Amino acid sequence: MNSPIRVAVLPVQQPEYVKAISEGGGVHEALGPQTSGLIWTDSQGPAELAELLVDFPNLRWVQLPFAGVDNFRGVFDQIITRGAATVFTSAKGAYREPVAEHALMLALALARALPERIRAQSWGEKFAATLYDSEVLIIGGGGIAEELIRLLSPFRAKISIVRRSIAPIAGVNNVIDLTDLEDALGAADFVFVASALTAETKGLFDEDAFNLMKSSAYFINIARGAIVDTVALERALRSGAIAGAGLDVTDPEPLPTGHTLWSSPNLIITPHTADTPEMCVRLLSERIVENTAKLHANEPLVGLVNLKLGY
């Protein structure tokens, strides 16, 4: 019988993660030469993590805390250069339910003109758009997109997905790649961004992209702020090039008090709260239990990061 997997939690020893290691059949310990796994709790600590990986080449597995791992691209490059065998898992898919729920909430709120109506002090004009039988475009094909597809199913929406791998997806009408994005943007009533931040997607939604969208279309970003050119988005909202936008992420982030984007019309900004810290701890703990058990059993881990692609 294999000995229990030894796993450290750094730089902050969350008690929930220590408990999760035990529930997965592992043993929590301080980082040392016999440690096989590392739960890394700092989404902004790539330099410190890179140093640890040099000092402790015995580490077989590193669990990162969030679905987006763009901050760690330099660490991945280091591992590739050294030819190290360390595998990384992200939380991709772990937070799919609350984030997809948040995206749907933003879309429904925009379609019912809630940014305007919440502040209204007079009756105003009747207006509503609907998700029923609408054309929906989702950028990204990971766990959040899959959950959003499930949530949209009662609305009979015609869904198109933009993703790297072109293969049929249940509940989706079309799966396309980035080369076909322009045509898809012109048909969409709702555009959801749920992709990783990569060299391909950084600044993907610029002035040209927003100008391709219908003036009645809504834009929702629950992925990474840098996928969107903030100036271009603000211009699109103020000019009426699009009907409205919902953002849980911004560039810069946090968006400074007094930034002109705050006063843009038909815009909802939430402060990166699609998944709260409390939600993340609970859901990441479930992922730690699962991956600790899989590492012990020499089974494929969940949420594996492709180091070359960066997600």
Image (cartoon, grey):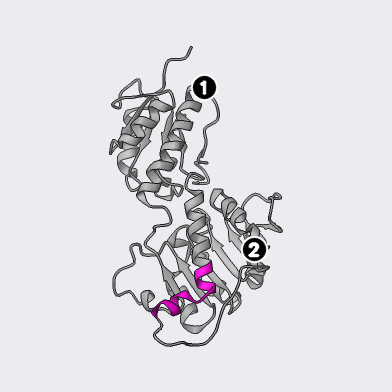
Q: Residues within 10 Å of mark 1 (few under 14, many from 20)?
A: few
Residue at x 57%, y 51% (from the top left corner):
147
Q: Residues within 10 Å of mark 2 (few under 14, many from 20)?
A: few
- Looking at the picture, tell me which residue is in the foreground, 60 or 109: 109
Identify the amino acid type marked 1. Answer: Ala
Q: Quadrant of residue 134?
A: bottom right
Identify the amino acid type marked 2. Answer: Phe
Q: Was residue 155 drawn as part of the magenta stretch in this picture?
A: no
* Label 2 residue SS: helix
Residue at x 66%, y 61% (from the top left corner):
159
- Real-space Cα distance between discs 2 and 1? 42 Å
Q: Is 35 placed above or below 39 here?
A: above
- Looking at the picture, tell me which residue is in the foreground, 263 or 235: 263
Q: Quadrant of residue 273?
A: bottom left
Q: Main secondary structure of the magenta part?
A: helix
Query: Percent x, y for residue 275?
Result: 42, 53
Q: Which mark is residue 10?
A: none
- Looking at the picture, tell me which residue is in the foreground, 177 or 57: 177
Q: Which mark is residue 155?
A: 2
The magenta stretch is 108-119
Can residue 79 be seen by looking at this rendering? no
- Disc 1 marks which residue? 297
Residue at x 51%, y 49% (from the top left corner):
96
Q: Quick one: label 2 or label 1, which is nearer the N terminus? A: 2
Point out the frontmost of discs 2 and 1: 2
Indicate left or right for 25 with 32 as reference: right
Q: Is 33 placed above or below 248 here?
A: above
Contact (Cβ within 8 Å) of mark 2 with mark 1? no
